Image: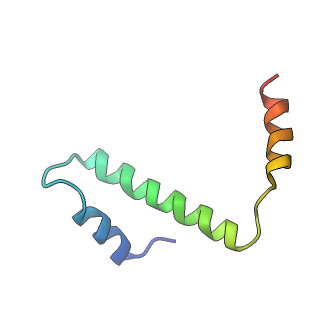
């Protein structure tokens, strides 16, 4: 989950002018990274071998 401080920090790091779309994309990106980290900390990950097996099926 995002927190206000993290969002504000990222907005402040953006250029002086930007589109609404750019800031929304940045917030979505930050949120996805946070979700991935939370899943990783919770052990909801797959090994490299498992990932390769899944990719092999998809790439046929």
- The image quarter containing residue 27 is bottom left
Residue at the outermost front position: 48
Q: Position of residue 18 (x, y in %)?
A: 19, 48
The relative height of residue 15 versus residue 39 in the rendered view (above or below) is above
The residue located at (22%, 46%) in the rendering is: 19
The figure's colour scheme reads rainbow
The relative height of residue 16 versus residue 52 in the rendered view (above or below) is below
Tell me: 49 left or right of 10: right
The mark total stands at 0
Residue at the outermost left position: 16
The residue located at (80%, 56%) in the rendering is: 46
Q: Position of residue 53 (x, y in %)?
A: 86, 39
The residue located at (26%, 63%) in the rendering is: 11
Tell me: 28 left or right of 52: left
Q: Quadrant of the C terminus?
A: top right
The residue located at (76%, 65%) in the rendering is: 44
- The image quarter containing residue 14 is bottom left
Residue at the outermost top position: 60
In front of the other: 22 or 9? 9
Q: Position of residue 17 (x, y in %)?
A: 14, 50
Tell me: 44 left or right of 25: right
Tell me: 10 left or right of 42: left
């Amino acid at each position: 989950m995002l927190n206000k401080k993290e969002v504000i920090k990222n907005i402040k790091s953006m250029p002086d002018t930007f589109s609404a779309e750019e800031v929304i994309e940045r917030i979505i990106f930050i949120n996805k990274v946070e979700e991935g980290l939370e899943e990783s900390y919770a052990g909801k990950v797959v090994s490299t071998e498992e990932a390769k097996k899944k990719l092999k099926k998809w790439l046929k």
